[in-house]
Amino acid sequence: DGGITQSPKYLFRKEGQNVTLSCEQNLNHDAMYWYRQDPGQGLRLIYYSQIVNDFQKGDIAEGYSVSREKKESFPLTVTSAQKNPTAFYLCASTQNGVNYGYTFGSGTRLTVV
Amino acid sequence: GQSLEQPSEVTAVEGAIVQINCTYQTSGFYGLSWYQQHDGGAPTFLSYNGLDGLEETGRFSSFLSRSDSYGYLLLQELQMKDSASYFCAGGTGAGSYQLTFGKGTKLSVIP
């Protein structure tokens, strides 16, 4: 079945370390997104990509980086510059030109220890 | 920019009907979507309104009035499994539309 796979499900990071969250989709979707969710909050856009080798900053890109070397993959790196990285991270995808019906992965819960 | 406002919590009785409202302020608006998220889970797409009016999908309906910058999600015949958070999301951006989400409404269904 098609879908989005995020790994790991839980991740613990020491302060000052960079960590990379994986996101892989087999839906043949063009566009991929990273959202951050804090308790009791909505989803805030970190980065998005409409095509391979191209990506744009979202509303809260500071302290994060991404790459899009393959259509299927859109990893997110949380760098040591991100001051408050503890959150639930969600990856999503959709076809270009479609503004609804996003498919989400099951998320990665990152905790800084 | 976009902002979407929705109530933070709603409680309703099993079998009843509940309406979750969403108002928005936006420029370049491209439609309103609704997503359901159970605790610790992934959001799942419920409904979309690109034009004014009512869209019905089973027990769920969604309404949009672009002139009023207002929409709502209507859940009928509530079941315990409907206890979840519900997010409205507005589409913006040309090409690959970006979604801006409201902060979510936590629905508690009680017996």
Image: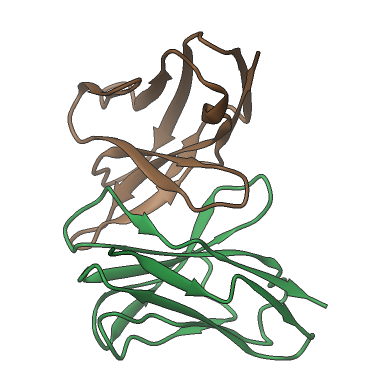
Chain colours: A green, B brown
Residue at position x 54%, y 29% in the image: B81
Specify whether residue A69 is in view.
Answer: yes
List x then y, in percent, for residue A3.
33, 64
Residue at position x 19%, y 54% in the image: A98
Image quarter for residue B11? top right
Q: Nearer the viewer, residue B49 or A20?
A: A20
Image quarter for residue B56? top left
List x then y, in percent, for residue A26.
27, 72
Specify whether residue B1 is in view.
Answer: no
Q: Residue furthest top?
A: B16
Taking A63 as reference, is A107 above or below it? above
Q: Residue furthest right?
A: A113
Residue at position x 41%, y 50% in the image: B100
Taking A17 as reference, is A94 above or below it? above
Q: Residue furthest front?
A: A1
Which quadrant: the N terminus of chain A? bottom left
Taking B66 as reference, is A87 above or below it? below
Which quadrant: the C terminus of chain A? bottom right
